[in-house]
Amino acid sequence: MTAPTETEQGRGLRLEVPITFSPQPLDDLDDSAVVIAEPAQRLRTTHWDTAELRLARWGVALEHSADAGWVLRLPATSEGMAAPDGAELQFDGAPERPPESVLHLVRAYSRRAPIEMVARLVTMTADTVLLDAHGAVLARLVDDTVAVYSGPRITQRFREIDVISANEPMLDAIASRYQQAGAQPARPRALVARALGLVGTPPPEIGSVTLGGAATAGDVVKRALSLSVIRLLRHDPGVRLGLDAEDVHQARVATRRLRSDLRTFRPLLDEAWAEGLRDDLRWLGSELGRVRDSEVLRDRLRSAATSLPEADRRSALAVVAPLVGQVRAARRHLLAAMDTERYIDVIDHLVAAVRAPALTVMASTPAREVLPGLVRKPWRSLKAGAIAARGDVPDEQLHDLRIRAKRCRYAAEAAAAATGKNAAKFAREVAALQEVLGELHDAVVAEAWLRERSAAPRIHETALFAAGELVALQRDAAEQSRTGWPSIWKRVEGGWNGAWR
């Protein structure tokens, strides 16, 4: 039996059954059970993808039906718009071609490949509900018989039954009974893949890299680069929709990690190849950073404004109101950049790069022998920066220390995938240092913006007073970070020696 999946109504199991499958009655599974068969419904859908099924490879589904119109299903992401269960978006539009708004959202996946109709399906759906004596749902069965058409002809028919129940023994009992009658656990694959007669969903455009004890340094590089490019593309639709600021944040993190990894793993990579990627990422990171920095500043000062006494809150919110327009302008600039051929070139370049990275001979060396030495360089840079930052130093120097911490953290995290939990623990300590220094930087930036805003002509007295209160809050936050980072640094320094044991 395959592992059941989680649904809103409980755990679910999908079974493949013959077209002529005749399930046994379920009344005897519970003495008080009542079986209700709902009227069957017919649904006609067209499924759209590229010829290579690029959408399906990324877990994306695009279909059209008369009942629902255009439906775009996006997979779950770690954070952002689609987390944690994925997103289902509906669009109006004529059935002959997907709306431009939909094509816009999947452009990072399809890129220059045209999206066309790849399957036309007619599905007969029969729902059966099993109720207990109190009318509570014990189980629900969704029986789909699918006919695949090419013109007027049926080219294939198949049938699947979803068994859903919050009662695990009930789920197992129904599944066992059905399997004894000839049902089999469904192979994991996209509906469009089965409609096209494929054995499984086509492999991902970028495959995951599993590291074992014999992993080479090149394997670690492939894994690190793949994870970041996957993260970037997963969040592309969310960035375009603009519903959750976390999508821009995660996309920016992906570009930063990639740049950092290219720096850390420089001895393992062809230099000209890596430099081309760095140029791409520098441009894209700048576009994402303009939006992210504006969003962080807006959200920080909004939060500070709402924390003020009620008498000052309205004036404080008026002071920070221009940041809304600043974020909108930055987003327009970003979206315009993402609609260019250059952006598609960058995505194509990144996908090709992680599928076949240009590695040096050194990359074939066992990871455990090579990685500690590669992480040592960003570690020495971080340590030198921390020693130089002792005492009363400018904020710019602490910001530089934060950048060094970020590079060291990313390097340690990439290495930890092959070297073990001690390196991962060290990376977490460095992340804590990065966080407190990041809080300092954000507070300094916020104070500078407030001072510039206060110098604007014709600003009201009450607004000046509120701006002063906000400046005081930022100064307090900055001072806490200035006094707090040295104690965190001690933990980082102490964790380095044990990181590679």
Image (tube, helix red, strand yellow):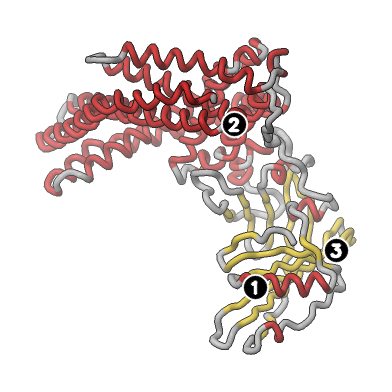
* Res. 31 image quadrant: bottom right
To which residue does mark 3 refer?
157
Amino acid under disc 3: Arg
What residue appears at the point 46 percent right and 17 percent down from the top-left corner?
Answer: 379
* Res. 142 image quadrant: bottom right
Location of residue 370 in the rendering, given as x and y in whole percent from the top left corner: 62, 17
How far apart marks 1 and 2 lie (CA) works out to: 38 Å
Query: Could you tell which of marks 1 and 2 lies nearer the N-terminus?
Result: 1
Location of residue 468 in the rendering, given as x and y in whole percent from the top left corner: 14, 32
State the residue in front, 479 or 488: 488
In the picture, the quarter occupied by the C terminus is top right
Secondary element under disc 2, as helix, strand or loop, is: helix
State the residue in front, 257 or 487: 487
How far apart marks 3 and 1 lie (CA) works out to: 31 Å
Query: Could you tell which of marks 2 and 3 lies nearer the N-terminus?
Result: 3
Callout 3 environment at 10 Å: few (<14), some (14 to 19), or many (20+)? some
Label 1 with label 2: CB-CB less than 8 Å: no
